[in-house]
């Protein structure tokens, strides 16, 4: 039986979010290139419900997705739009 590694688990976790990046081997490769094991563990532990954060934010911005930009720069072009990540307050300014 195959046990999913931390990057495969993180890919599944990200696919459940509103932006809905489907889990794939390309996504696992992008995550592996951008997160060390500890960072992947932390990202996997982040809650997926952000409604209170959005309701409390004073500034909200949409930004380019670093995962999709990295894929494009690595020659693994990405069809979906890149302006899909949300930033709040200080990061949004």
Image: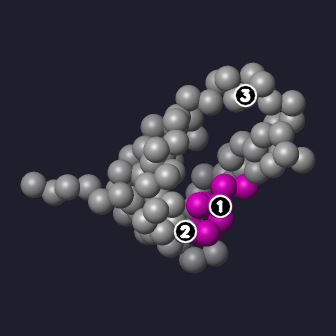
The answer to whether residue 27 is seen in the rendering is no
Dividing the picture into quadrants, the one containing residue 19 is top right
Q: CA distance from mark 2 to mark 3?
A: 26 Å
Crowding at dot 1, Cα within 10 Å, few <14 / some 14-19 / many 20+, comes out as: some
Instruction: Judge left or right: residue 59 versus residue 73.
Output: right
Choose the circle earlier in sequence order: 3 or 1: 3
Residue 34: which disc?
Answer: 2
Say how the picture is coloured.
Answer: one colour
Quarter occupied by residue 73: bottom right
Q: Residue at x 89, y 47 (%)?
A: 93
Looking at the rendered image, the disc whose residue lies closer to the viewer, 1 or 2, is: 2
Residue highlighted by disc 1 = 66
Q: Earlier in the sequence, mark 2 or mark 3?
A: 2
Badge 1 vs badge 2, beta-carbon distance below 8 Å: yes
Q: Tell me where the magenta segment starts and ends, as one range.
A: 64-72
Q: Is residue 70 magenta?
A: yes
Q: Nearer the viewer, mark 3 or mark 1?
A: 3
Crowd around label 3: few <14 · some 14–19 · many ≥20 (10 Å): some
Where's residue 17, x and y in %?
Answer: 52, 37
| Residue 18 place in picture, x, y as percent | 56, 35
Q: Is residue 88 above or below residue 34?
A: above
Disc 3 marks which residue?
Answer: 54
* Figure check: 63 above or below 47: below
**Does the rendering let one see residue 56?**
yes
* Residue at screen point 46% across, 44% down: 45
The one nearer the camera, 17 or 41, is 41
Q: Which residue: 62% across, 30% down? A: 50
Q: Secondary structure at mark 1?
A: helix
Circle 3/circle 1 CB separation < 8 Å: no
């Amino acid at each position: 039986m195959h046990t999913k590694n931390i990057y495969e688990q993180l890919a599944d976790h990200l696919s459940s979010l509103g932006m809905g990046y489907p889990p794939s081997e390309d996504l696992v490769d992008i995550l592996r290139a951008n997160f060390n094991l500890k960072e992947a563990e932390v990202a996997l532990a982040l809650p997926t419900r952000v409604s209170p954060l959005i309701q409390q934010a004073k500034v909200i911005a949409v930004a380019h997705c670093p995962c999709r930009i990295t894929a494009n720069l690595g020659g693994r072009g990405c069809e979906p739009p890149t302006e899909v990540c949300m930033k709040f307050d200080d990061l949004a300014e």
